[in-house]
Image (cartoon, coloured by chain):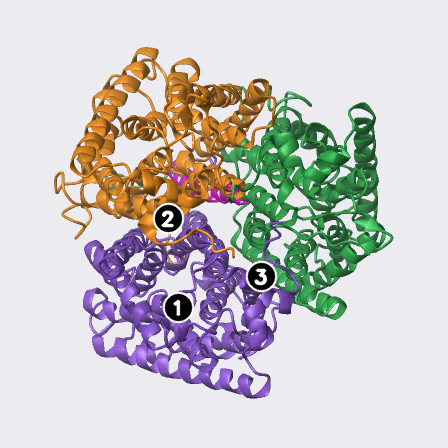
Chain colours: A orange, B purple, C green
Amino acid sequence: MEQLNEVTPEMLNEVLIAANEAKFIANNLWLLVATVLVFIMHLGFATLEAGLVQKKNVVNILFKNVMIVSIGLISYYFVGFSLMYPGVNPGGFFGFAGFGLTPPEGGLTSAYGNYTYYTDFIFQGMFAATCCTIVSGAVAERIKLVPFLVFCTLFVTISYPITGMWKWGAGWLDAIGFYDFAGSTLVHSVGGWAALAGIILLGPRKGKYSKKGIKPIPGHSMPLAAIGVFLLWFGWFGFNGGSVLSADPASVSLVFVTTSLAAAAGALGAFLVSYLMFKSYDLSMVLNGILGGLVGITASADGVAIPSSLIIGLIAGCLIPLSVTFFDRMKLDDPVGATSVHLVCGIWGTIAVAIFGNYGEGVGTFYAQLIGVLAIGLFTFAFSFLLFYLLKIVFGIRVSSEEEVKGLDVEEHDLRAYAFN
Amino acid sequence: MEQLNEVTPEMLNEVLIAANEAKFIANNLWLLVATVLVFIMHLGFATLEAGLVQKKNVVNILFKNVMIVSIGLISYYFVGFSLMYPGVNPGGFFGFAGFGLTPPEGGLTSAYGNYTYYTDFIFQGMFAATCCTIVSGAVAERIKLVPFLVFCTLFVTISYPITGMWKWGAGWLDAIGFYDFAGSTLVHSVGGWAALAGIILLGPRKGKYSKKGIKPIPGHSMPLAAIGVFLLWFGWFGFNGGSVLSADPASVSLVFVTTSLAAAAGALGAFLVSYLMFKSYDLSMVLNGILGGLVGITASADGVAIPSSLIIGLIAGCLIPLSVTFFDRMKLDDPVGATSVHLVCGIWGTIAVAIFGNYGEGVGTFYAQLIGVLAIGLFTFAFSFLLFYLLKIVFGIRVSSEEEVKGLDVEEHDLRAYAFN
Amino acid sequence: MEQLNEVTPEMLNEVLIAANEAKFIANNLWLLVATVLVFIMHLGFATLEAGLVQKKNVVNILFKNVMIVSIGLISYYFVGFSLMYPGVNPGGFFGFAGFGLTPPEGGLTSAYGNYTYYTDFIFQGMFAATCCTIVSGAVAERIKLVPFLVFCTLFVTISYPITGMWKWGAGWLDAIGFYDFAGSTLVHSVGGWAALAGIILLGPRKGKYSKKGIKPIPGHSMPLAAIGVFLLWFGWFGFNGGSVLSADPASVSLVFVTTSLAAAAGALGAFLVSYLMFKSYDLSMVLNGILGGLVGITASADGVAIPSSLIIGLIAGCLIPLSVTFFDRMKLDDPVGATSVHLVCGIWGTIAVAIFGNYGEGVGTFYAQLIGVLAIGLFTFAFSFLLFYLLKIVFGIRVSSEEEVKGLDVEEHDLRAYAFN
């Protein structure tokens, strides 16, 4: 370059391209790392749910979690992704840009935004699969394997993407100002509504509710449950942090702080309220309190002041023991507390946007948030209830009484979770 | 800058340097993050293998896995790295650029490529250590500790780097167009061949094969096994994604999608075939199906269409129950199924490059892939067989019959895996 | 741009800003990823400690670890952060820039350095919470829950930030040339001194030391302990790698190599010395040897030659069995070996800076290192001893003899870790 005396605009432009390329690489990289973090949430759910069920149903719950992530990714590839983001796929509703033979033009360059088309798919695919994992815990210990997997496939293929499209696919909820940053409603309460439909149609586990009252059925391994919660918190840095959809330093770091403090405050809230209610230091409540805090902040992690994140998390944590007790009184048997964590705290988090969020005029109003909660709740609950109901009529969804007593591991899987003798 | 009226080429050049530095930082960062992900695969192997052995041999398998990563990194530092990448070390075959006193010139700047010399070493070192971990599962529950560690040391120091150099060190296999993106053959089937040699020389566990047929010896903890598989999938994002050797958005995101879908399809394949074969929902098959899918896609993750990745993974998953049954019929006792996962699916993945890969003229031909599989297989099997044989003659490689019955934990480690009473 | 004939300095400046923004994004991203890695160390500590205590106290140790990270983050937000880094908070000692309502000017842009104000807080907050986790293992199986949590809160709020400020807040130890890269002393031995104070005031577990000698009380689950150590090593890539405070490729990759090789050498050292001492392959020693190596290299990971990192780790590993035996002889009962790992190897690592470190004139001298070790040790031990002593007088810190025998899980938490029947 020393031979030249002049710098031309073309030369400058080349340097600008290099600078923008560097930004693109860094932004895309964060989305990929976030994908990896969201992936490990599947292990988080698997261990949490395995820890909270009885020893005789552990293989079954592991099997479900392993299949859900697999089925989820493949279903989302074939249909869900195109359905949820109508604009991104020139091939229409089905497939992944013409079944993945080639991504759309510009889809692998920075022209597409801060990440590539493949990055977009894999990040969103991990989210989608998460949704069913929420259901699996609530219906554990009594649902038949194959009908459950059929439910998951159709849920990820149809229901989750449709309600997702309403907001994230620039649909009608987006138009009225509904705001849900990373999915307190779009992911978590959606999973929670499906779980509730399943619980109602399945009925409680044998002996859970009787004239003698509510029988506690303790989970078989608290270390597994604790591993699950820590891994979920770990993954949530990707779930919320990645939802910034770039590595923008100010936004992602704010999200990290609000997410962490809400989780921490959730633990405190559950600790205090469960101590007042039960006079003991209840590990399972505190673990679910953390998750409640995380679910609660998910709708607004990018747009609240730090002290607000503490309050959102604290309230979510306080809701957990109350909600768990409430569902038990209603004889809605949820072995892992998924409806309390994902449905109740998901709704709370979505409403909290209207109270604490700073998103400018007309965005995240109380009205819009309420409409969003109701519309998505109604659609998802109706879809799930109908689908579970159809499966119940056609195949049956509950294992036999004998199988439930013996445990699903031996009957369905011919394998025990532990060979300890 | 406002004082100047002119922009000189030198000024432009400085800005270009800043832009390239930013790219370099992002590319190098991805390799480092990938290193961390590959590292955790060691925990994945440790928990998978611990879960699939009997309770009485758990401490032993954990001990081995802890030592392998330690010995592997140190051996690779002293010899393996220089041997595998002849060009990179001006200090010759031994040591790490003169035993690490200083990296080669330019080794810490972008002049070296997309990452520093230290990054290169630590990423490749994590790969190298992985190879022995594959062996440890297959020979579990009956091999003597010290001879096994001696085997690992020499294997990582000599055998793995030599065959690795043939391709990744720009050796003769590279010259004939053999393609193996992240090591279906160079890492996985290499580990598989060594495992096979060990299995043959050790013989099966007591009572595994008798006149009464094949005795199932179930693993002691399915949660541990499932944790292992999820962590391996998690780490594989770094194993395959990092093998792009930059954070190039198009390539890395493609690799993430092909890798994930192959894993998911592997689960489906194993699910279906094992159900047809055994009429049960077999968790261990599905877990190994995921690993089979991952091993299968490893050779071509950067160069196949998305639907091809599904097919590669599906076939790999289908191979798992067939292969496990086959090895059992051959009375080759592999407690964790490592030969099926890493050897069989590693060969399949390498051949699949010739069927599905898009690498241009003369690269990844069927001929080249076959030569690669055979040459590396022959060398590795011969090396491993000889080394195990020598160790057998000199020290003995199998524990006493009494020790095998009592378990290796009490006899070799004076410690039980669980104190549950 | 093609319309223009000339490139103005303003145009060049805009491109320079884009290039610098790209660097800022990448640097900040690494700090955030490192934060996630340090976070998971809390799961590492939780599983390590849970694995090494008796089955009857597992829920209690999990509960503590879950609460510590939560309390730690919140305390550090309210006071610790401002106290430790006096310059960063214009709001004074309390709160997080006026209790977090707004970060200081420039705090979300590159003007602040290589990361945002929020990134700084969350990365340092994860460090702070780590410190108490070290204590929880040492005082396990006999300390009362609430006094312990009160101790943690005050320790993270006051003691840890004050000694931290002496060096990292540009205080007097920094001025005399004391060097401690990522906290061999500032984090690890600080935790170790607090642990020692707790151990002394609590006394040993019932029956541990009697006229018959030292009774071994084996941990209840070696898989959990091994998971813990692997996760800690995993997290240490963020702990040490993030302490570079940028993604500078040369520095971070050097830190990755020195950290990994020190951990590996720590395993070897503990393997050899424990074999010589006990004639068995002692898993718990090797696991603690890895941790010892990691703690040892933490003070100098960015400034030693590679072979020096091997020596530092090897010596740290050798120290572990000697130190564990020593503390047992002194009747200082530490169920998980935290004082050996964090205090002894923390001191060794800090002194090693003076022997192996390359930090230029007047930095890391033997004198400065010794002063640092002594001053921080004295302050922390005195603070912890007094605080534990006050708690002992006011509330009592030890559970009743009956509760200790029955286990803390049933008495304090009304929950068993495992429901295996």
Distance Cα–Cα, label 2 vs label 3: 26 Å
Amino acid under disc 2? Asp
What residue lies at 73% left-to-right and 58% top-to-bottom? C320
Query: In the rendered structure, which segment of residues is drawn in magenta?
Result: C10-37
Q: Main secondary structure of the magenta part?
A: helix
Seen at 63% across and 26% down, the residue is C89
Q: Where is residue A317 shown, x and y percent of the image?
A: 50, 23
A342 vs B368: above or below:
above
> Is C20 within the magenta?
yes
Q: Amino acid at mark 3?
A: Val
Left or right position of A218 against B255: right
| B95 relative to A354, above or below | below
Horizontal and vertical percent position of residue C340: 74, 52
Q: Which residue is mark 3?
A: B59
Q: Give the residue number, with chain letter if any, for mark 2.
A: A409
Q: Report the front residue among B13 and B121.
A: B121
- Determine the image quadrant of residue B378: bottom left
Find the distance from the CA under tag 1 to the CA under tag 3: 23 Å
Subunit ID for the residue under disc 2 = A
Instruction: Return the residue at label 1.
Output: B215
Q: Is residue C311 left or right of residue C98?
A: right
Looking at the image, can residue A85 be seen?
Answer: no
Residue at (67%, 32%) from the top-left corner? C85
Helix, strand or loop under label 1: loop
Q: Are marks 1 and 2 in contact (CB under 8 Å)?
A: no
* Label 3 packing within 10 angstroms: few (<14), some (14-19), many (20+): many
Q: Earlier in the sequence, mark 1 or mark 3?
A: 3
